[in-house]
Image (cartoon, rainbow, N blue to C red):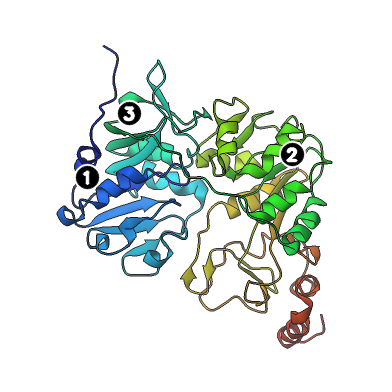
Amino acid sequence: MPATLKIVAAEEAVACVKSGNRVFFQGAAMTPNVLIDALCDRYRDLEDIEIIQMHTEGQAKYTSEPYTDAFRISSCFVGGNVRKAIDSAKGDYIPIFLSEIHLLFRREILPLDVAFIQVSPPDKHGYCSLGTSVDVTLPAIQTAKRVIAQVNPQVPRTHGDGIIHIRQIDKAIEVDKPIYSSQINGMTDVERKIGAHVAELIEDGATLQMGIGNIPNAVLNNLHGHRRLGIHTEMFSDGILPLVEKGIITGEDKEIKTGKIVTCFAVGTQALYDFVHDNPSVHFKEAAFTNDTAVIRQNPKVTAINSAIEIDLTGQVCADTIGTYQYSGVGGQMDFIRGASLSEGGKPIIAMPSLTHKGVSKITPFLKHGAGVTTTRAHVHYVATEYGVVNLFGKSLEQRAKALISIAHPDHRQVLEEQAFERFKTLV
């Protein structure tokens, strides 16, 4: 007899979680918030529950009172909904490359008791799709003792590795609601200038990695005259859609999965989800594949575009903390910075505004006290602001300082020059 999904009420589905368990939450647009909220409703009956996740969307009730009496979060990335918890006694951050999170599960460094996921309904063969978030969800499912699913007909059925059989699901609940979507915000003049500078570095036939946000979208907006671009990335959003429609993104020059858009997750509007639904040109893979430097480097002209919170005058990049405050996470920046630098004709790029929203220079003499070095100065090549692009590869410390000062905001250049002179004892 063929297997069938065991559909139960949410309260019954989460009843398998016991005190002392370690529970994984699928993230991004696929965050199973109905299951998560049902688990939070049990907080009086539970204690010492460790939550393992990357970046979830939604309220994250488990990080606030009174739920923190039962739940403690250990996050491999830090989004806005959990920052306060991570900065408190009720949460912590695990510094780790996105490419290596799967090892925590597969090597039983962090063995999982339960995995909460969201999937599409099964097809006639009994297979469900993990939708737009395969990333580290696939290894979590493969190693967790129990898998509890939120089955939702509004989850896109995506191609690639994110297909699981209902035999892998212990219990399931049914919901019918849109998955999380993010809207496109208007761009500033600064973001447009950065996008134009970075676009000048991108060659025809390049393989692109970029994330979500206005700067990646500004870059993409400047690529309508390019040809034969490919995508191999950890995530993408709506910005690529016009380029796919115009035949600019074809992937024909890629070595790895030629002709395919490769990613491990996607977040965007409903238009993006409609695009990836049952689209064989888009392959969702686990992060152990998309972010593997040995895989990335095989593609031609890999152009990796990442951001920074601050960069010091020697080129050290902090992209995950503000001083000691854990703002985001290491993620896949180093995976792709290194992969791009090893790719034939590759270009690793750090792109950022010259100033913070408060008018503080993001190019600084020294990183803030307690700041993490996300990308070392030995790995940094191109740095872009609205004032231009410099290439630090092969430059000495003094030369790097001079180059970076040239793309700092003009209001801060004199102070930076004075600090550089004090440090290097010579005019830069």
Q: Residue at x 60, y 67 (%)?
A: 309
Circle 3: residue type:
Gln
Q: Are marks 1 and 2 in contact (CB under 8 Å)?
A: no
Figure check: 369 above or below 140: below
- Number of marks drawn: 3
Front residue of this view, candidates 178 and 344: 178
Q: Are marks 3 and 2 in contact (CB under 8 Å)?
A: no
- Using the rendered view, name the quadrant where residue 5 is placed: top left
Q: Secondary structure at mark 2?
A: loop
Q: Is residue 200 left or right of residue 208?
A: right
Q: Earlier in the sequence, mark 3 or mark 1?
A: 1
How many residues crowd mark 2 within 10 Å: few (<14), some (14–19), many (20+)?
many
Circle 1: residue type:
Val
> What is the number of the mark on residue 168?
3
How many residues crowd mark 1 within 10 Å: few (<14), some (14–19), many (20+)?
some
Quadrant of the image containing the C terminus: bottom right
Q: Is residue 334 left or right of residue 4?
A: right
In the rendered image, which residue does mark 2 sit on? 300
Quadrant of the image containing the N terminus: top left
How far is mark 3 from mark 1, CA to CA?
17 Å
Q: Residue at x 44, y 51 (%)?
A: 57
Q: Residue at x 37, y 55 (%)?
A: 60
Q: Earlier in the sequence, mark 3 or mark 2?
A: 3
**Residue 298 visible here:** no
How many residues crowd mark 3 within 10 Å: few (<14), some (14–19), many (20+)?
some
Figure check: 203 above or below 306: above
Q: Is residue 269 left or right of residue 92?
A: right
x and y, in percent, of residue 231 in the image:
67, 38
